[in-house]
Amino acid sequence: MKTQQQANPTQPTKFDNIQGRITQIQQLAEAGGLNAVSIKKGGKDTPVESKSVFNAINTVARVAEMEIFQALNKIYQAKLFIEIATNQGGTITNKDGEPLTSEELLERAFNDLSEAQTQLESLIDLNKGNA
């Protein structure tokens, strides 16, 4: 069975793209929120633009929403694979049109649950500021 990292060894996470925005939001919060006149950026005071702040917050929220939606889809897909594997009430085929065995269905379910777990852990780490 392949782990998520083996399946996609070089795929960058979406979280890498929003770290600067999270830092920007944290700096703004430390500077006094929307009442702040400026924040430190590169050692210099930079005027605060509320538009950029809201853009940063919206970007973080959109990425989190997408990750949650993808994790839920993976969980739902895993549930279907498990139901089919245990009930043998339906058939899922591979690329060649051959039906998958119960073991193969359970392996796919496990892979989907592992991917969902990775996505949810990334969101938790992001919330803690550790991503």
Image (cartoon, rainbow, N blue to C red):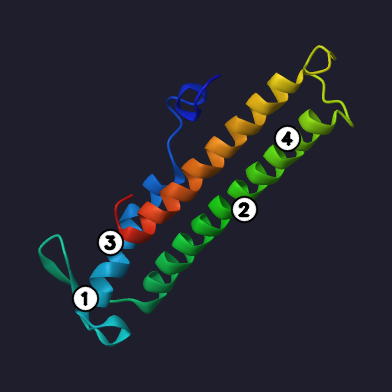
Marks 4 and 1 close (CB-CB < 8 Å): no
**Residue at mark 4 to residue at mark 2: CA–CA distance:** 20 Å
Q: Residues within 10 Å of mark 2 (few under 14, many from 20)?
A: some
**Where is the N terminus found, in terms of image quarters?**
top right
- Where residue 75 appears, as percent x and y from the top left, is 64, 44
Indicate which label's residue lies in the foreground, 3 or 4.
4
Residue matched to label 1: 30
Residue found at the very far left of the displayed protein: 43
Residue matched to label 3: 23
Q: What's the residue type where badge 3 is placed?
A: Thr
Mark before the other along the chain sequence, 3 or 2: 3
- Where residue 23 appears, as percent x and y from the top left, is 28, 61
Residue 115's place in the image compared with 28, above or below, is: above
Residue 75's place in the image compared with 100, above or below, is: below
Where residue 94 sits, quadrant-wise, is top right
Which of 121/43 is in front?
121
Check residue 82 in the rendering and tell me which mark sits there, or answer none. 4
**Residue at mark 2 to residue at mark 1: CA–CA distance:** 31 Å
